[in-house]
Amino acid sequence: MRKIFVPLLACFSLSALAATPQTATLDVQNMTCSTCAITIRKALEAVPGVIDAKVDYDHKTATVKYDPAKSDTSALLKATTNAGFPSKLHGGAPKQ
């Protein structure tokens, strides 16, 4: 029983220390086709700490769920810019 309890306790302790994921919406420039959306999504998913990235071609936005302990909005903005699609935060600060 002890062999099971100790690793289980460690998992709960680590999850309690994990930061609450945040969501940021980015306004993305230069998106001219649906293939651009795929490129942007892949660039965002490559950022450490990104949990999920959804790109909306019609609205020219990207919604990114990320771990603030591993990444921040400046890394997200840099990723899209480096992929050829400069972006800015939609509406200011990221949502929690």
Image: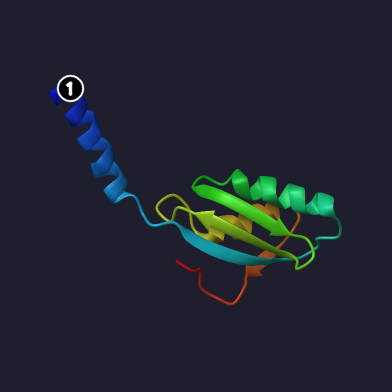
Asked if residue 9 lies left or right of residue 76, the reply is: left
- Could you say where residue 9 lies in the image, as x and y percent from the top left? 21, 37
* One can see residue 83 in this view: no
Q: Position of residue 71 (x, y in %)?
A: 48, 53
Where's the N terminus, which quadrant?
Answer: top left
Residue 11 locus on image (x, y percent): 28, 37
Check disc 1 and report its element: helix, strand or loop: helix
Three-letter amino acid code at disc 1?
Lys
The residue identified by callout 1 is 3
Q: Quadrant of residue 26?
A: bottom right
Image x and y of residue 31, in percent? 81, 60
Residue that appears at 68% across and 45% down: 42
Left or right, 2 with reference to 93: left
Q: Residue 55 lies in what quarter of the image? A: bottom right
| Residue under the point 79% across and 65% down | 58
- Left-right relation of 36 to 17: right
Q: Nearer the viewer, residue 83 or 31?
A: 31
